[in-house]
Image: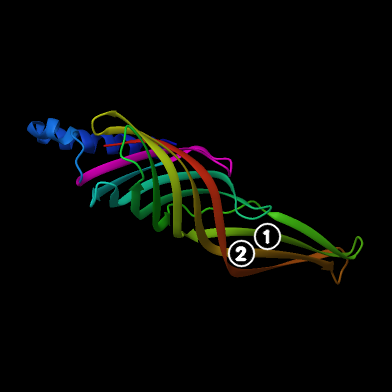
Amino acid sequence: MKSVLLFSIFTLVVITSAFSARPGKFSQWLDEKPSGWYNVTSFSLATTSGQYMNGMQTIFGYKVKPRLGVGIGVGIERFTAMHMYDVYKANLSMLPVFADVRYTLIKSTISPFVAVDAGFKILLNIPSTQYTTHTDTIYPGYAWNTWYDYDTYKSGGWFVNCEAGIKVRVCKRLSLNGSFGYSLWSVSGTRNTFLYQFLPASQGGVQETDFLSTLKTKAIIHSFLFRLGFSF
């Protein structure tokens, strides 16, 4: 959450500095035009995967037609105890970098819109999931195998977001946005398996040996999410 807050403050400082540098253009900038530059900043309030207030993104784009805009965006996300598989969970910090295309269906005070984002999510940490373990008994009290499995993620992956929402104009060019969308993305790493083998020792007792095996793995993650933000 601290990184999300810092990113939000940085975005607001950049926008404020841009206006301060050219105060004479401020009133002209407020008037919505059929073409020109725009910004959309939004916050992820909730997802169906159980995440709340977990990120934000800002998009700088150009309106090529009165209803069509294209741009590039960057964001920051934090997922806590995110379900990777049925039993595996991990804490992920992501930096999405993407292209954005959005279309406004009706030009009015309350305007529905649709948007598609596609890009790459950079993994900022190297998280490991919790362990799962099971034991196979070879001979009760004398010999058994205990298995420990977990995943370690080392890189992000490509993603796509599709969303639909409503834009409410509050004063000339400034609008409040709310949207509901679907996100599909992935992270890659290794599946780690430890085998602890307990066998009878030659002089009595138990001899313990261990083995480690790793395989490449990829987690495909998807969820629906609700965003709230502003555009100008």
Q: Are marks 1 and 2 in contact (CB under 8 Å)?
A: yes
Q: Which quadrant is home to the N terminus?
A: top left
Q: Which residues are magenta?
A: 35-55
- Image quarter of residue 121: bottom left
Is residue 53 shown in magenta?
yes
Q: Residue at x 81, y 60 (%)?
A: 135
Instruction: Reply above or below: 34 against 147.
Output: above
Q: Residue at x 37, y 46 (%)?
A: 75
Return the disc, 1 or 2, that comes first in the chain's sequence: 1
- Residue under circle 2? 191
Q: In the image, 93: left or right of 22?
A: right
Q: Residue at x 36, y 54 (%)?
A: 97
Q: Nearer the viewer, residue 177 or 67?
A: 67
Instruction: Reply above or below: 137 against 128.
Output: below
Q: Nearer the viewer, residue 84 or 171?
A: 171
Residue at far right of view: 140
Main secondary structure type of the part rendered in magenta: strand
- Total numbered badges shown on the rendered structure: 2
Is residue 214 shown in magenta?
no
Q: In the image, 34: left or right of 186?
A: left
Q: In the image, 225: left or right of 21?
A: right
Q: Position of residue 214 (x, y in %)?
A: 61, 69
Q: Position of residue 141 (x, y in %)?
A: 91, 60
- Residue 149: numbered disc: 1
**Residue type, numbered disc 1:** Asp
**Residue type, numbered disc 2:** Arg
Q: Which quadrant is home to the C terminus?
A: top left
